[in-house]
Image (spheres, grey):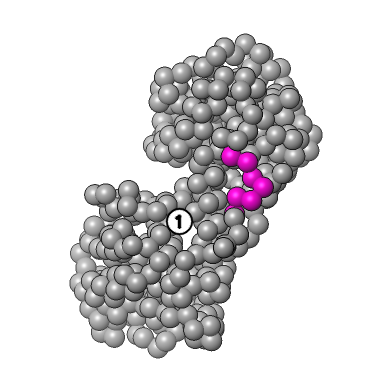
Amino acid sequence: MAANPLQGIKSIKDLAIENKRVFLRVDFNVPLDKNNPSVITDDSRIREAIPTIKHALERGARVILASHLGRPKPGKTAGLGMEPCGARLAELMSIEVHVPEDCIGDAPKKVIGDLRAGQVCLLENLRFHEEEEKDDADFAQKLASLAQDGVYVDDAFGAVHRAHASVHAIAKLFPERGCGFLLEKEIAALGKLVLGADKPYVAVLGGAKVSDKIAVIEALLGQVDALVIGGAMANTFLAAKGVRVQASRVEEDKLALARTLLEKAAEKKVEILLPVDVVVAPDLESTEGKTVRVSEIPEGTMALDIGPDTVAAFARRFATAKTIFWNGPMGMFEKKAFAGGSFGVAQAMADSNAFTVVGGGDSAAAVHAAGGDIAKKMGHISTGGGASLELIEGKKLPGIEVLRT
Ligand code: ADP
Ligand code: MG
């Protein structure tokens, strides 16, 4: 039996929160409209926190929500206040959400003291205090004092890889602590891959650069039966094997590393699948492509997607897999002409009988863009970029470890 990644971590289901104060760390770090920062362009992160908030409210808890938003510079708070998030949450849940003018001190104390049943307090942006990112003990104490004798619940998966005050230092100040539903789901799904994925285990990697993913590739080589490589990353591997990829994006300084990784894979008997055909175009501005064998990429063109034969080969490998993890799009999927590879891989994963997990911001976006019921058919789509990759690498994440009691 594989170890349980949630060992020692209480779920909010098992915490005595009835009529208590609950300090709930959420990830409301939503994308904002560049021209009008009071407009939230994608509210998924707010929606994903609702089951946990609802659970707490239904048990009469007084809920104190806390989040960071963006990267405010010291003393510059304009456009990064939590008010728009509070307004959206109020709308989505049909509840009253009060946003005090600060996250510590008298302003939140007053708001929390006045809270009535069914109302919540959303603290002002934690990063307005630079102590947040310093994991400052005193700042953590001030936050914790808002939920005196209460319970700490973390549901901010996107932030657990950072040792910041609201996800790390604060947790130890609450004997009663645990995870919300979203964090629980993330740890269970990604933790299962690391601690005991059912085999054969196939990992699919793509995306912009090899250099972004070196640690993940190295970690996966010790875990998987096959590594499927697409996206711009594949160009560097193809070039390392002597394929003339012409104008394709290649990380020249990573060619030696790519060779070493291929040798390591051979030693560990990890099967490597690279593209056999690609969709090429003259440049990144192109809106039309042409499918060619990788050995016949025309001079002056670059590979912007994997081709249909490659998708078919990848799909054949998926058919016998019991676990599939995907990170990194297979091509420049933001353009229709170069989306076929990513959508094809998404479809093949959805059709397989394996436990399927998708991690990474752009990969998750590709799965949603693929449409139909593809997203629904995935075992798990992770909401965290950095956090999901660090978990896959087998790292211990500060915001998760501190929850164990
Ligand atoms: P994730 O966010 O899922 O971890 P990455 O950020 O690593 O993924 O990579 C996503 C980006 O890689 C996308 O913007 C996509 O357009 C780009 N990309 C993938 N393949 C290619 C390619 N062959 N040429 C150029 N860009 C590519
Ligand atoms: Mg990305």
Count the labels in the image: 1
Q: Nearer the viewer, residue 247 or 146?
A: 146
Mark 1 lies on residue: 359
Q: Is residue 384 magenta?
A: no
Which segment is the magenta one? 5-11
Does residue 106 appear left or right of residue 230 in this picture? right
Residue beneath the point at 32% across and 48% down: 376
Q: Quadrant of residue 354?
A: bottom left
Q: Amino acid at mark 1?
A: Gly
Picture coordinates of residue 301, whole percent (x, y): 28, 75
Picture coordinates of residue 216, whole percent (x, y): 54, 67
Q: Nearer the viewer, residue 149 or 45?
A: 149
Residue beneath the point at 59% across and 39% down: 11
Residue beneath the point at 42% across and 51% down: 381
Q: Is residue 161 above or below residue 263?
A: above
| Observer able to see residue 124 | no
Q: Is residue 246 above or below residue 343?
A: below
Q: Is residue 155 above or below residue 285?
A: above
Label 1 C-beta lies within 8 Å of the nearest ligand 1 atom: yes
Q: Quadrant of residue 44?
A: top left
Q: Quadrant of residue 4?
A: bottom right
| Observer able to see residue 180 | yes
State the quadrant of the C terminus: top right
